[in-house]
Image (cartoon, rainbow, N blue to C red):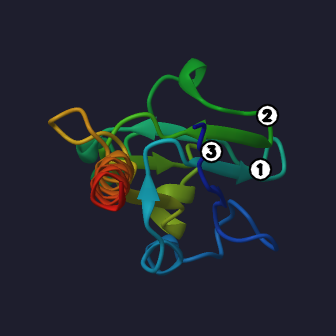
């Protein structure tokens, strides 16, 4: 069974990645999971995207320019759980306009448990066991 993640247009479909959006407000009602994608849509040369650590996020520290995403339509796949941070490194967009996004990524629901059997399989096996037991009783 293949599952695809949710695609989130960062900042919303209208403005996207810009200096006008409050990204804390934008992210607060969303739940991000491993496998989801963040889409950063913006005008090239007006913005860029850096994946940073927590301290770089807090201080708006811009990494080397060669680490920037600059296509104007950057798609970031969330590959692991935990906190993730993104900033714009153009001019003072991060420090003056708060153009930065912090999210927490949760594990994908419905994956195998620590015992190697998913909840779906456990329910399926219980159903099969009941059907077999009923068949034996009726015979």
Say which mark, if any, is on residue 80: none
Note whether 105 is above or below 61 in the view shown.
below
Instruction: Pick whichever, 96 or 132, lies toward us.
Output: 132
Nearest to viewer (mark 3 / mark 1): 3
First of labels 3, 2 by sequence position: 3
First of labels 3, 1 by sequence position: 3
Task: Say what secondary structure mark 2 lies in.
Answer: loop
Nearest to viewer (mark 1 / mark 2): 2
Residue 32: x percent and y percent? 45, 58
The residue carrying pointer 1 sits among few (fewer than 14), some (14 to 19) or many (20 or more) residues within 10 Å by Cα, namely: some
Instruction: Pick whichever, 20 or 108, lies toward us.
Output: 108
Q: Which residue is mark 2?
A: 71
Task: Say what secondary structure mark 3 lies in.
Answer: loop
Q: Residue at x 69, y 64 (%)?
A: 18
Q: Residue at x 26, y 46 (%)?
A: 54
Q: Residue at x 40, y 49 (%)?
A: 108
The residue carrying pointer 2 sits among few (fewer than 14), some (14 to 19) or many (20 or more) residues within 10 Å by Cα, namely: some
Total residue callouts? 3
Residue 19: x percent and y percent? 64, 67
Point out the image quarter for the C terminus. Answer: bottom left
Q: Which residue is mark 3?
A: 4
Point out the image quarter for the N terminus. Answer: top right
Note whether 108 is above or below 19 in the view shown.
above
Note whether 47 is above or below 94 in the view shown.
above
Instruction: Pick whichever, 85 or 119, lies toward us.
Output: 119
First of labels 1, 2 by sequence position: 1
Say which mark, if any, is on residue 46: 1
- Using the numbered discs, state the Cα–Cα distance from disc 3 to disc 1 in whole angstroms: 31 Å
Residue 137: x percent and y percent? 27, 59
- Using the numbered discs, state the Cα–Cα distance from disc 1 to disc 2 in whole angstroms: 11 Å
């Amino acid at each position: 069974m293949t599952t695809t993640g949710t695609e989130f247009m960062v900042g919303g479909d209208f403005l996207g990645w810009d200096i006008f959006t409050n990204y804390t407000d934008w992210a607060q009602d969303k739940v991000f999971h491993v496998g989801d994608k963040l889409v950063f849509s913006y005008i090239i040369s007006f913005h860029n995207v850096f994946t940073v650590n927590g301290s770089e996020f807090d201080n708006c520290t811009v990494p080397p320019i060669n680490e920037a995403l600059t296509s104007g339509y950057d798609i970031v796949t969330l590959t692991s759980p935990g906190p993730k941070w993104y900033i714009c490194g153009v001019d003072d967009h991060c420090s003056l306009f708060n153009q930065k996004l912090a999210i927490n990524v949760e594990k994908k629901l419905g994956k195998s448990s620590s015992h190697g059997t998913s909840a779906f399989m456990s329910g399926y096996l219980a159903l099969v066991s009941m059907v077999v037991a009923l068949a034996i009783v009726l015979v």
